[in-house]
Amino acid sequence: MIIAVSSPDGKFSTEFSPRFGRCNFFIIIDTDTREWESKPNPAANARGGAGPQAVQFLSASGAEAAITGRYGPNAFTTLKAAGIRAYIADAGTPEELLDRFLAGTLEEVNAATGGELHH
Amino acid sequence: MKIAIASGKGGTGKTTIATAFAQALSRAEYSVSLLDCDVEGPNSHIFIQPEFDQFEDVNMLIPSVDDETCTGCGQCAEVCQFHAIVVIGGQTLVFPEMCHGCGSCTLICPEEAITEIPKRLGILEGGLSQEGIRFGHGILNIGEPMAVPVISKLKKWQDLMDAEVVLIDSPPGASCPVVESLRGADYIILVTEPTPFGLHDLRQAYKVTQELGIPAGVIINRDGIGDTGVEQYCEEVGLQIFMQIPLERKIGQGIAQGKSLLEIKPEYENRFLQLYLQIIEALSIVDRS
Amino acid sequence: MKQLVILSGKGGTGKTSVAAAFAHLLSLQNTPSKTVFADADVDAANLELVLSPSVISKEEFWGGSIAEIDSDDCTSCGICAEVCRFDAVIVKEDLYTVDPIACDGCAACVYQCPEEAISMKEQLAGEWYQSESLYGPLFHANLIPAQENSGKLVTLVKQQARLLALDEAKDLVLVDGPPGIGCPVISAASGADLALIVAEPTASGVHDMHRVLKTTAHFDVESLICINKADIYPEGTEAIEKFCQNEGIRVVGKIPFDLAVTESMVQGKPVTAYQADSPASLAIHDLWKEVMDVIQDLGA
């Protein structure tokens, strides 16, 4: 399974980014092999619609789940439509979050958590 | 006669000039209207104090997709130049804040699954001031990026546009909202301050007037600060300087309190009447050449 | 890395003077500077006038596209004019053309033309530059006057600043914003961690400060206020302070009216570099320390 973790610096072992649509990087991880790659988020500085654009990027990258701090309503709606599952965390590195994902201890959300963050 | 008051740089005194000009003309019994086109930060009403009695919403039509009829073909997303429609996982999602209201998606949909619903961008308010100035302004909604439709609707208020002298208080800058405000004007007054920032932005604003092919002249505000760069530039390119308003604490304080320039300095009334005659003269020279 | 944007609502309140002084003070704190500067007022780019930049690279900015009708293929059926909601199609004696200033670039006419006689042409809308300024890297741009898409150019300038900041592990991107609350302001404030709003104690300044505060709140950007020319109308300053207290917004500085600010601009220098002990410089120094403390306390 392919999952994506938002990241400020594109690294596997430093703190993740709680921002979704406007994070600087996504760490795309294959949960079977633990292989990962870092991809710059093309929506990081989008004037509007960063959430949906980030989701389209993740969808094209084959991600089936996303892990971040919070989701705006637009991002969440788009994730749902794309069939990408949404998980949240307070803290952790992508590496730690992968372990928590595999252990089934990450919180999956079924509604937007970030209020009106989008535009 | 339509005269627009513009400047590249913000805070140079456009509103001070526009409101004083309107008051002077009105007191001399011209039929005058003032349109505040700075819909992001409209301030002229503070100095004119109109009685608002005319209100109108400015709406834009945005798409609404009927999920039953939609086949998820994606043509709407393909034609949208603004990423306002996304088709993902067979669903069609609309993001109104990105939409320009062009209607292209509705026209292209082969299933006729898209209808359009109005979204409010802002409002227009109009009314008469005690001095008899016909006043109108637009107010852009918070968080709304699109100022141009609000400006263009304000400029379609016919009773305002029919006045003998129509004054237009433009937003600052040199891009679309400014162009929309200035379009159709007979003459443009560029307000600047005699500083390097003022000069740099005056050049930008002057280029906009040239692009539009509208003759322009200059008023220098806060004269006495800064340097002589603006005057030299005006001489170089042949821009007429109509008025130089000195930097005076009394003026600054009065404006801060919401008093108009004519309230603070009644002697300017005559200078603005002169300005009007000078503009007519300048235009007749343009006509003859 | 944090992003600080300087805004005002009303123009001419002193955004650029504050931004330039911050640039100078930041460079005194760290050499080489750990900040990247971005001038996001592309309609009236003035930061370059006081940071003495030397341009390292210059790129064209191709903005939005506009429609163009090929008169050879056009049969004057009029459908383009019917579908255009921006009154951009001009008809003169059966000759159809597009007014490039009115065209919004939506391409509705392109898709509706039965003859496929309309195409979109990209427009050269400006230039953007990467420069090395006296106080660190500066990204700035010039929009060609009367062009569209200033918001898009703002986004581009910021993105470049941000990429360099990431590459070179800088701490801060300082964005000098445009006036207003519309498209380019939204672009400038997008993704910011903190906004410093330069207010002015005048009737117009207060009115516009309210609007820009509502805008930053709408986009969930935390805001601080500083009051420039605070002594020209003390009652106005008090009103702003009272308002901010009620709303729970911090006033982090008050800058007095000081002719040294204009003099420094004429000299092409930040006021703190021109006259470090002038009243405005001292006030901006205190303001800067307050703002940096807030930034340091922000979470990741």
Image: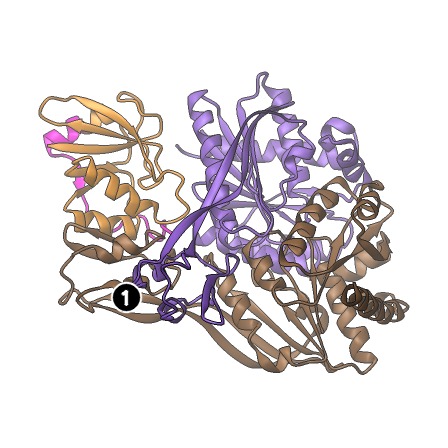
Residue A111 visible in the picture: no
Report which quarter residue B105 is drawn in.
bottom left
- Closer to us: B185 or A47: B185
Question: Residue A15: image x %, image y %?
Answer: 31, 26
Q: Which colour is chain A painted?
A: orange
For residue C69, above or below residue A62: below
Q: Is residue B264 left or right of residue C64?
A: right
Is C291 within the magenta? Answer: no
Give the structural element (helix, strand or loop) at label 1: helix
Give the residue drawn at x 40%, y 39%: A45
Chain letter corresponding to the colour purple: C
Q: Is residue C242 left or right of residue A23?
A: right
Q: Label 1: which residue? A: B106
* Start-end of magenta stretch: A98-119
Q: Is residue C114 left or right of residue B112?
A: right
Report which quarter residue B31 is drawn in.
bottom right
Question: Residue B94: image x %, image y %?
Answer: 28, 58
